[in-house]
Image (cartoon, rainbow, N blue to C red):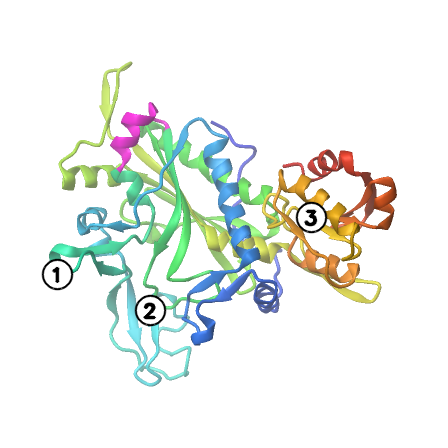
């Protein structure tokens, strides 16, 4: 139960960020089909976004990288896919119906709404600058409520989940009995959550519909503190391994007045965005609060009996909960760079190969036969192993630049010499170095370069 090294904490005082980077990344997302505003032909829908061809694959890769790390490569974690809709009893037991609120204030001058706890000056409106125009704060529940079935009424009232965690708690007994696991073990889930945020913003960082990647790790009570430290280091290292620079990453422990009522310790993994530090993931020691609450409200025992020791106990829970869409934005921001090459500005997304939407792009030098037929042969061999792009339009230099902008690590150019010697040119995104490689050895060569 060890991770390599200790995860650093603190402010990272030497870290710097470019304020203009936010607009550059947002513009790139629209231009290259990464993220679109939802329903733009109807004027858009605030705080809702659609992921385009490149973005959908990037988001899938972020989630797959998390799943690989948290489930595939571990023997002590299993997966779950729980329902988005849940009855009120779940959220009453979890405390969301009574406690899942933000303090809402209205500016009587410009009619805008704000979260009181996020105002820099609680006496001045950040929108219009008016002073002493806020209404009294009132609790605003963040849950989306709807109705199941044809008749509206209390009996048909259901809620869209504001987090994926509760599905894992209410299925604890089912998973325990069917998976043959015993504490310490975890249940992992990736899925959509919904929160009726008062002030969504900063592009896809804070939205009302988002995706989470959560683990509930159930442990014997006396092991909870050491597992909490273990998961702090593990989750911090995951972001480093996928390309986030240490200068833009930190672990911030919550002060006592920030802790949830059930938490004995919580820390956030934060990334230095262009607007400042923002949370990517929270790791919490939740104790036995959740299982006890659901046991009390449902009437079912949610505990573990250790036959070896004869001990019966309610496990404690360590919860690493990450935002998939927030992580995507952090990876995009960290990977974005511009550099001058022969008096030309080159934009590059230096994404880790595991995250890159396309691992390989196949680029025939001409759109004419028989070059395209050979390129199709090369593409088919590569597609068996990786997501690949194919582009035969515009000059080869422009096609390289396009692949650089969407983060493709390797380009394979099929030229007229390839017809005679069956060699192709492999170009590296980061160094722009080019190597001639025989087609019959291409897959092995690319595999060694990608190292996936």
Residue hosting label 3: 409
Q: Position of residue 300 (x, y in %)?
A: 16, 34
Alpha-carbon neighbours of circle 1 within 10 Å: few (<14), some, or many (≥20)? few
Instruction: Determine which quarter of the picture holds residue 426.
Output: top right
Q: Which circle, 2 or 1, is nearer the viewer?
A: 1
Give the residues in magenta.
171-184
Q: Residue at x 79, y 66 (%)?
A: 344
Q: Position of residue 13 (x, y in %)?
A: 58, 55
Residue 12 visible in the current orientation: no
Mark pair 3, 1: CA separation:
54 Å
Residue hosting label 1: 153
Q: Which mark is residue 116?
A: 2
Mark pair 2, 1: CA separation:
32 Å
- Evaluate if marks 3 and 1 touch, with contact meaning CB atoms under 8 Å apart: no
Q: Position of residue 213 (x, y in %)?
A: 42, 45
Q: Nearer the viewer, residue 12 or 286?
A: 286
């Amino acid at each position: 139960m060890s991770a390599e090294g200790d995860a650093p904490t603190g402010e990272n005082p030497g870290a710097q960020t470019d304020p203009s980077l936010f607009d550059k990344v947002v513009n790139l997302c629209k231009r290259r089909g990464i993220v679109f505003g939802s329903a733009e032909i109807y004027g858009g829908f605030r705080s809702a976004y659609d992921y385009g061809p490149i973005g959908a694959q990037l988001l899938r890769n972020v989630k797959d990288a998390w799943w690989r790390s948290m489930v595939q490569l571990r023997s002590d974690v299993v997966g779950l896919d729980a329902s988005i809709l849940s009855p009120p009893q779940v959220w009453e037991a979890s405390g969301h119906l009574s406690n899942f609120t933000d303090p809402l204030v209205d500016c009587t001058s410009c009619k805008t709404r704000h979260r009181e706890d996020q105002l820099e000056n609680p006496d001045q409106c950040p929108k219009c600058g008016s002073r002493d125009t806020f209404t009294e704060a009132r609790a605003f529940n963040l849950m989306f409520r709807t109705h199941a079935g044809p008749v509206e009424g209390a009996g048909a009232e259901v809620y869209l989940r504001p987090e994926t965690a509760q599905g894992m708690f209410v299925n604890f007994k089912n998973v325990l009995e069917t998976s043959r696991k015993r504490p310490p073990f975890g249940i992992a889930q990736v899925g959509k959550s919904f929160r009726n945020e008062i002030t969504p913003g900063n592009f896809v960082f804070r939205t009302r519909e988002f995706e989470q990647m959560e683990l509930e790790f159930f442990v014997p009570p006396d092991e909870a503190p050491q597992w909490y430290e273990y998961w702090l280091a593990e989750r911090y290292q995951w972001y480093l391994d996928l390309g986030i620079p240490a200068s833009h990453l930190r672990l911030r422990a919550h002060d006592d007045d920030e802790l949830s009522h059930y938490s004995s310790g919580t820390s956030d993994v934060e990334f230095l965005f262009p607007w400042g530090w923002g949370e990517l993931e929270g790791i919490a020691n939740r104790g036995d609060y959740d299982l006890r609450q659901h046991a009390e409200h449902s009437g079912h025992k949610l505990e573990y009996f250790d036959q070896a020791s004869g001990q019966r106990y309610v496990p404690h829970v360590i919860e690493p909960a990450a935002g998939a869409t927030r992580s995507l934005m952090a990876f995009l921001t960290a990977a974005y760079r511009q550099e001058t090459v022969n008096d030309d500005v080159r934009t590059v997304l230096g994404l880790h190969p595991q995250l890159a939407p396309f691992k390989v792009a196949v680029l025939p030098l001409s759109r004419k036969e028989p070059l395209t037929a050979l390129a199709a042969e090369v593409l088919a061999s590569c597609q068996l192993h990786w997501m690949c792009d194919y582009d035969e339009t515009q000059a080869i230099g422009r096609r390289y630049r396009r692949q650089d902008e969407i983060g493709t690590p390797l380009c394979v150019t099929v030229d007229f010499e390839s017809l005679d010697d069956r060699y192709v040119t492999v170009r590296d995104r980061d160094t722009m170095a080019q190597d001639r490689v025989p087609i019959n050895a291409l897959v092995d060569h690319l595999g060694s370069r990608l190292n996936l």
